[in-house]
Amino acid sequence: MSSYNQRERKWILLRLAVQENLVPGETFAEKLRNMENYGFEGVEISYGQCPQKMEEAKQTLPSSKIRFSTVCGTPSGLLGPDRKTRAQTMQGVKDLLKMCAELDGVGVICAPIFGGTTDNRSLPVDRDAYDRLMEKLAEKT
């Protein structure tokens, strides 16, 4: 699939990926075959399933046309008010990035907070906090 980039005035290739848990199949290998048949080129693994799926993914992806794309989602709490929760979530994101790298993935899809903050911080404050967290994460991974 391709799309036209008007700013750069050129066509770009779009690769479609799908979340592994949305594809029918009893095993990861069967799901990969179904993804190929449906026309997908990449697979996303949900963060909650990532540790359990790693070995199977390492074994089956090399013999498939499907490539690992991303880890989908992260534990919540990255911008929460509790320092301990933020630290645990940050460590969880680091672990997911390491798993992603082992599978030659692009990265982790990360929504830092769902449904707004519980302590009524403003959006600019949240953006600044998120930027600082991502800078720390980039330094350590």
Image: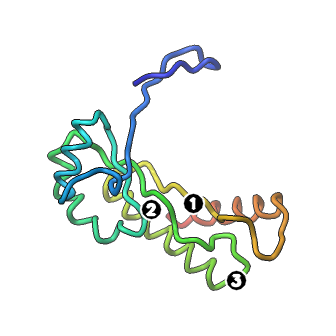
Residue 62 is tagged as none
- Residue at the extreme front of the image, as rendered: 24
Residue 138 is tagged as 1
Query: Considering depth in this image, is 136 or 53 the residue closer to the camera?
Result: 53
Question: Which residue is at 40% across, 64% downward?
Answer: 98
Q: In the shown orientation, is residue 126 left or right of residue 21?
A: right
Query: Which amino acid type corresponds to the residue marked 2 in the rendered image?
Result: Leu
Rate crowding at label 3 as few (under 14), some (14 to 19) or many (20 or more) other CA atoms within 10 Å. Answer: few
Question: Spatial distance from mark 1 to mark 2, Cα to Cα?
Answer: 10 Å
First-in-chain label (3 vs 1): 3
Question: Which residue is at 17% across, 51% downward?
Answer: 30
Residue carrying label 2: 97
Query: Which amino acid type corresponds to the residue marked 1 in the rendered image?
Result: Ala
First-in-chain label (3 vs 2): 3
Question: Spatial distance from mark 3 to mark 2, Cα to Cα?
Answer: 23 Å
The quarter holding residue 16 reads top left
